[in-house]
Image (cartoon, coloured by chain):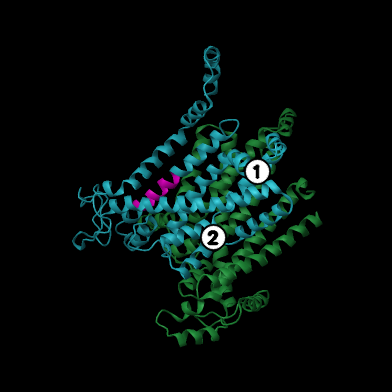
Amino acid sequence: MSVTSSSTLPAPAVLSAALPPLPAWRRKLRRLLGHRGLVLGALFLAVIVLAAIFAPLLAPHDPFDQDVTARLIPPVWQAQGSWEHILGTDKLGRDYLSRLIFGARVSLTIGIAAALISGLIGTTLGVLAGYFGGRTDAVISYLITTRLAMPVVLVALAMASLVGGSLKVVIVLLGLLLWDRFAVVTRSATQQLRDAEFIAAAKAIGASTPYILLREILPNIMGALIVVATLEMAHAILLEATLSFLGLGVQPPTPSWGLMVAEGKTYMFFKPWVIVIPGVALALLVLAINLVGDGLRDVNAPDGRN
Amino acid sequence: MLIYLLRRLAIALCVALTVSVVSFTLLHLSGDLAVSIAGPEATAAQVESVRTQFGLDRPLTTQYVDWLGRAVQLDFGKSFYFQGPVMEMISERLPITIKLGGSALLLAILTAIPLGVLAALYRDTWLDRTALLIAVVGQAMPSFWFGLTLILLFAVTLHWLPVAGNESWQHFILPAVALGYYAMPAMMRLTRSGMLEVLGSDYIRTARAKGLSKSRVVFKHALRNAVIPVVALAAVELGFMLGGSVVIESVYSMQGLGQLAWDAISRNDYPVVQAVVLIIAMFYIGLTFLADVINALLDPRIRTR
């Protein structure tokens, strides 16, 4: 690849010298579209998000409708499968495809909401620690170390069991537990900016500290922040599935992919598809989010790739 | 060096103390323990008798100091459910979890470092892309689901390995793979980026210019520096794996620490839950301290900081 690009480089260079330079956002868009993983991940994520938004229109059946005469029907590609239930039915005769589509809502809601809460906590701590340094930094770094020492799954399970598992509880718990990476990344990103000239310039013209933090620092660490947000979204989605699988997350009959795996566990030896389908959906969603995150990191990196 | 280590040790001890306070208060504030223990059908009088019986009527600080005073002597009180000492239950279960976490970490290291080195040496080739694909898939699969799929494939379909339990070493293979695959991608990526950075540095160019063989440059000069952050990460990952063992142990019905914690949580057996959370946190703190020590030994620059 490097050979061909070096031989074709001179021609466009000559051409572009004659043309006016592209605006910054178009150059950025080009880099975004040139990243294969990013485009693939974004497309797939868009499909899942659209499916979640338009779930009531797309789902062929009511995800809560039980039908004891149609229990554990296999998917359409198996011998006893039918087009009536494309992905089959679960132990209560509920349509698996419809539950899968509505399950995307649960996963995405939790991923986005938990990432927002933890992002708010982590970014606040990280920016303060990175900007002020000294004692503030010492205290916040200590908080981060303490948080990292607490086993997330165990603490979340114990607290969910006390409060009672539900969608809201899972969102709040994960939001309060997953801020560590936000804090670590924004702290070091802010440290690198703290002594930059434009910050000194803002101070010189008398800008207030909140103004500098919100209007000068924050926009400049946005790139790193978005990358962490995608990773934490994926993390939260996996943890919700884990909590629901263990019975302390989202409660039945809500269609959650982790819960679908838990409900199918008893039948998996004879009907493997009951756990394969929701598991593959989970893995594909997390994969798509991670591809977007990795791609954004590559594109944001100063030297382009890697 | 000594001052550096003493400072790290002091921080580690403070963190341990803070974790104990936080986990204690979190569990006591998120619900009325007496109500949880007495059960949903208990009368108000029964709840009150539970409260006095377990000492839950005392002020929170008194309860904490009392609990911590005995916890440092490894006495975590008696289980609400079994009435036996918590420490006995833990020491019975701990070896299984350590064996599981240790073998998972070993598997992760043994695949992550060679793959990461290969990916860096053959950057942007199919080898690099395959390594990346393995990492990306590993990060995307929920570990409980991967664990179940492994059972379906290797235990139910192929009959190569047992389905669940922890009686023999064969029982540990599938859970260790499931747990290790989750930790592997981060270590592989770090090895790869570390190797890329080191391979581009001046001293490697010098080593090559001196006419050293490629394998000598890679293994003796580059790898040693590239693995420093990986060592730190490996220690941290082991801590995470002990905490995450609750998931894998429940999938494979292994009688380890995670399963104990899970049973205790579903029975509202708080002395056990608190003890397990504290012990896993202690392991994590100890391991990160160990990582600091190893880092300081491998990289003299860190000591002087």
Can residue B162 be seen here? The reply is: no
**Residue drawn at x 26%, y 46% as measured from the top left:** A57
The answer to whether residue B106 is above or below residue A17 is below
Label ID, residue A190: 1
Q: Secondary structure at mark 2?
A: helix
Disc 2 sits on a residue from what chain?
A: A
The tally of labels here is 2
Q: Which residues are magenta?
A: A277-287
From the image, tell me which residue sits under label 2.
Answer: A152
State yes or no: residue A213 in magenta: no
Alpha carbon distance from label 2 to label 1: 26 Å
Q: Nearer the viewer, residue A267 or B12?
A: B12
Question: Where residue B151 sits in the image (x, y, percent)?
Answer: 40, 58
Q: Nearer the viewer, residue B47 or A304?
A: B47
Can residue B187 be seen here? The reply is: yes
Question: Where residue A45 sits in the image (x, y, percent)?
Answer: 40, 42
Q: Nearer the viewer, residue B83 or B96?
A: B83
Q: Nearer the viewer, residue B51 or A262?
A: B51
Q: Quadrant of the N terminus of chain B?
A: bottom right
The green-tinted chain is B
Question: Where residue A74 sits in the image (x, y, percent)?
Answer: 25, 53
